[in-house]
Every structure is written in structure tokens, then in C-alpha cells.
Amino acid sequence: MPQPTRTILDRFFLFIKGLAMGAANKVPGVSGGVVAFVAGFYEEFIYSLQKINGKAFMLLINGRFASFYRYVNGRFLSLLVLGMLVSYFSVSKILDFFIEKKELYVWAAFFGMIIGSIIYIGKGFKHWNRTTVIAFVIGMSVGLSLSFLDPARENDNLWFVFFCGIISVSGMTLPGLSGSFILILMGNYVLLLVDSVNALYDTMTEMIRGDFSFIHNQERKHMLLILSVFTLGSATGLVTLSHLLSYVLKHFKNITTAILLGFITGSLGVVWPWKKTIYRTGENGEFIRDSAGDRIIINYQRYLPDLQATETWVAVLYILLGISILLWLDWYGKRNNKNG
């Protein structure tokens, strides 16, 4: 796949897409891969990750950094990853705030965006037959069943943390499969996406102030080790899954697309707006909180909306807004292709 020439505006929008992917990956039930799929850079993303292979490492070892950068489509990946990192410490924090204050409306907007992505992908898929219909049903069944599983208990074993890292990137490489929700089911969402990240943030803040006392803080060092192992697992997962997906997209593109479309459809069960959040509680019924003081989510209890409530119809408007955003992205992408 040749690397496209990018204008300054293209680079800016690629950074924004990275922000959107990062924010989506942080929210349980939402898949960053859907952003890549709908925004039209999913295949380039998978292709670029697939280029991180033995040849790329040989270029690095031999000091041919410019060749390595070109070989792995470095400009594309660096802008995207930069957007994700910035999102993780900014946009996703804003998203956390609105989920806490206006949970129904946030989930409604995501619900609408996923419906919009189904419309977007579905109307462009013209290869329905017996095999692809079966693949779609399988994908939808797996996606839907995941939303009703009970989560496991937290586990900080480093091998398990490494495995969690591999699984967590599924939301980036498999549209419709939420890596953060999978971490909730595995019991390690708070440990890996809240506590360890907070430990890194606190450590960086202290180092900027010239305070290196964390060196003597065993708990802090343990959390940083957990984050390092999790990051290594995530990087391993990105590379290995991208190679696998590159192969199946090349040889079984229609079946793979049908399965991914099924995943996305099944994920509607996870982001159903009308649900009550179930928090982890102690023996006396008090809420158990993480190191940031936030209550720990363990699952959701879904219910049907009250059609007489005003907030229900406001939520419906947010669903329509979410659908509109995706349809606008579709229109914007087609207009850019025509102009290009």
C-alpha cells in the first residue's frame, strides 16, 4: 500500500482522529476501531502496524532511522498515536466527567454513533450471501453475549496483566469489540486504565517538581511496573493482531467485514443508554473506590425507557445527533475523495 501525500490539514484531521480513537478506547462499550473503520483509515492503520516486523527492527538496529520511519508509515502512525496519547490525558478525562454528570445523554450519543456506523458500513457492503450472513450472526452473537457476562475479580499477576494488554487493544484493531469493556470483564479495568495511569501521572508531576521520593514508594513502583507490562502487552497485541487481520482482510475480506459488522451490531447491547450502573460494594454495602476516589464499576443493569419522561426524548435527540455525526463523516469523506 503506497503512503499517501498528506497536506497540513490532512495531518491535523489525522491527529483529531487519534483523539477520537483514544477517547473511544477509554469508554467501556465503545470501540476505537469503529472510528478508524468509519473515518476511512482502518486498512491503512492495520497495514502500517503490520509493517512493524523483522525488517523494521533490522533497520532500527542498523541505525537507518529514516528508512525505518518511511517503512512503517511513521508519519501516519506518529500523528495517530500522538492524538491517542493526548486524548488519554485530556479528552478522555472530559468524557469521564460527562459520563459521571450526564451519563444517559453520553451513552445515547454513543448509541447513535454506533447505529450510524452500522448504516455507514452496511450500505457499502454488497456481498451478502449465505456465508457472510452466518458470519454476521456469529459476530453479533459474540458481541451481544459479551455485554451480559459478569466481570472477574482484579488480578495484578504480571503474566495476566501482559495478557490483558494484548486483549485491550482489540478495540483498536477489531471494530465493535470494546477493549475497555473486555478489561472490565477480566476485572482489571480500574487497575490498568485508572490506578496505574494515575500512578504515572503523579510520578511525572512529582518529577517535574524535582521530587523523586517515589523511588522509595514500593506501591508506586509496583503500579508503574504493572503499567509497563500492560503497555508491553498492548504493543505486542497491536503488532500480532495487525498481522493476523492483514492476512484475513486480504484473503477473507467479505467474511471478515461481515463478522466486524456483526460485532458492531452486538455492541449496541453494551452501550444501551438506559441502564443503571452497578458499583462494587463492601460487606456493609459501602462503595469501594479506586485510588482516585471514583466508585468502581462492575457492570450495568439495563431497563426500558420511560416514554413519558422528558429526559427520554432528550436522549433520543442525542441518539439522532450521534447518527448525524457519522452520516456527516460519510459525506465529508466522499466530498474529500471527489475533490482529491
Image (cartoon, helix red, strand yellow):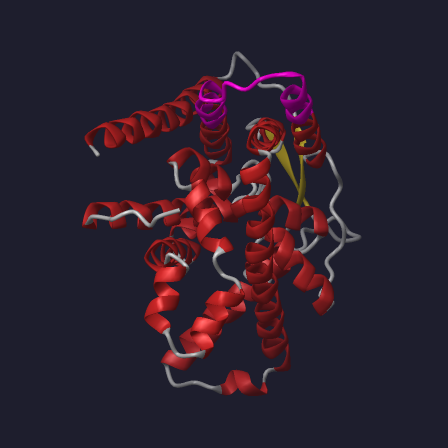
x then y, percent, for residue 16: 32, 47
Where are the magenta residues, as a range? 116-137
Position of 324 with respect to 194 (left or right) is: left
Position of 265 with respect to 340 (left or right) is: right
Q: Is residue 273 above or below residue 23?
A: above
Residue in view at x 67 percent, y 56 percent: 188
Residue in view at x 59 percent, y 40 percent: 248
| Number of callouts | 0
Q: Of residues 254 and 121, which is closer to you in this image?
A: 254
x then y, percent, for residue 223: 61, 71
x then y, percent, for residue 319: 45, 23
Q: Quadrant of the C terminus?
A: top left
x then y, percent, for residue 293: 56, 58
Residue in view at x 39 percent, y 36 percent: 40
Q: In terms of image quadrants, where is residue 109? A: top left
Asked whether residue 158 is drawn in magenta, I would say no
Residue 220 in view in this figure: yes
Q: Residue furthest right?
A: 283
Q: Is residue 273 above or below residue 279?
A: above
Position of 108 with respect to 236 (left or right) is: left
